Image: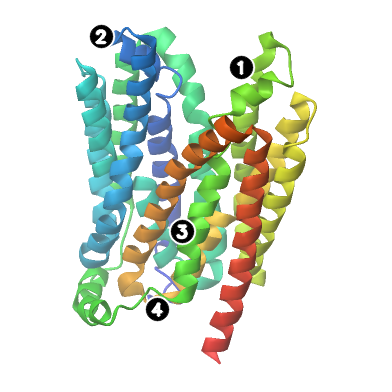
Amino acid sequence: MTITTTDPADGSRYWQRNLLVCVFGSFTTIIAMTLLLPFLPLYVEQLGVTDHAAIGLWSGLAYGATFFSAALTAPLWGRLGDRYGRKLMLIRASLGMAVAMTLLGMAHSVWQLVALRLLAGLLGGYASGSMILVATQTPKARTGWALGVLSSGIMAGNFIGPLVGGILPPLIGIRATFMVAGATIFISFLATTFLLREEPGAAIRRKQEIMPATATGAGLSRPVLAMLITGTLLMVANMSIEPIITLYVAQLVESRQVTFVAGLVMASAALGSIVSASWLGKLADRNGPWTVIIGCLLAAGLLLIPQALVTRGWQLVALRFFMGVALGGLLPCIASVIRHNVPDKIAGRMLGYSTSAQYVGQVAGPLLGGFIGGHFGMRPVFFGTCALLVIGAGYNAFARLASARADK
């Protein structure tokens, strides 16, 4: 049923159309940003780097550059979206990413590759911008479900991107693959420009109200702080085993099966999140996002224990799938809690901080996992991540009780 009121609790009258556009745009832009994973070392080699150690170093720098610049700029884009319109930020992100991806296919040195990856993170942020727009324009009673649908689209992009990156370069070449990615994002730019709608005057009203809210420091409440920490924990849990997964799988299967099973392990968690995100978001609308967050953190933490004790590759694949199912509900619930605990006029900035916290987890997770795995063994990585998630569940339970007491 179409929404016909613009009251913040009822959302925008265009929220359903906007959700479809944001899911399509996030899906295509995430595919374009992740498709380079399978061939990034090959592209670095094409750009003149021949030493194997140097290829690994430059590949890591090029891959991490986007997350680094995106983490720094996410709060800025969120704040500008509060002031000047969230649709405008999505138009900026989609056009900027289309240009950056196209230029990546024209790089002639590894320095240019890293610089352009930094540019992609600086100008991008379509998925995080979509999360802000959907969170603030959807009726509050449907926020969890809508954010779950959007999260499924984002996870699907993360799942499909590397597959596309493994198929296209042998067929059309690496440089042409970047061109195709840029053209795909340009389609998202056109869809965002001509199909997405924002309530007339919404940005102006937020701009008039923003200064008093900023002056009082509104937004950084206990629930918001808990969500920033939870977002970091989510990405740490997702990424902590990335540096060791191939070595760990090598202990479980024959050598000729290692890369195949390692790929299945990585993909299974994303597939689990795709399956569960919208369902858990709907559950959060019915029972409250705090309940889902605490339950998901506990379930994911407990699932890490048997992962440290597996003796077969298929067991790890199955457990990572169920862990993905548990973690799939966290992103929509995090955004939903923030949406319900900050005024609309600063929601973009607070959700931008949440995005930055998640990027911190994406960087910290592999570093933490690699350090523990290298110094103490691979199984302690699972136990350590389990402890973090269980502590996070306890902290969220405490934050929910404290927030409930404060509201009385």
The amino acid beneath tag 2 is Gly
Q: Earlier in the sequence, mark 3 or mark 1?
A: 3
Residue 28 location, quadrant: top left
Is disc 3 placed on a helix, strand or loop? helix
Mark 3 or mark 2: name the one nearer the start of the chain.
3
Percent x, y of residue 177: 35, 18
User: Is the Cβ of the residue at disc 4 closer than 8 Å to that at disc 1?
Assistant: no
Q: In which quarter of the image is the C terminus?
A: bottom right
Depth check, mark 3 against mark 1: the one in front is 1
Residue type of the residue flagged with mark 3: Gln
Q: How many marks?
A: 4
Q: Which of marks 4 and 3 is nearer the N terminus?
A: 4
Q: Which amino acid does label 4 sit on?
A: Asp
Could you say which quadrant of the image residue 94 lies in? top left
* Residue underneath mark 1: 259
The residue under label 3 is 16
Question: Along the polypeptide, which appears first: circle 2 or circle 1?
Answer: 2
State the CA–CA distance, disc 3 to disc 1: 41 Å
What amino acid is at disc 1? Thr
Q: Which residue is identified by label 2?
A: 48
Please tell me which residue is depicted at 54% across the width and 66% down the height of the picture.
142
Spatial CA distance of label 2 from label 1 is 26 Å
Residue furthest front in the image = 375
Label 2 CA crowd tier, 10 Å (few <14, some 14–19, many 20+): few
Residue 55 left/right relative to 202: right
Element marked by disc 4: loop
Residue indicated by mark 4: 7
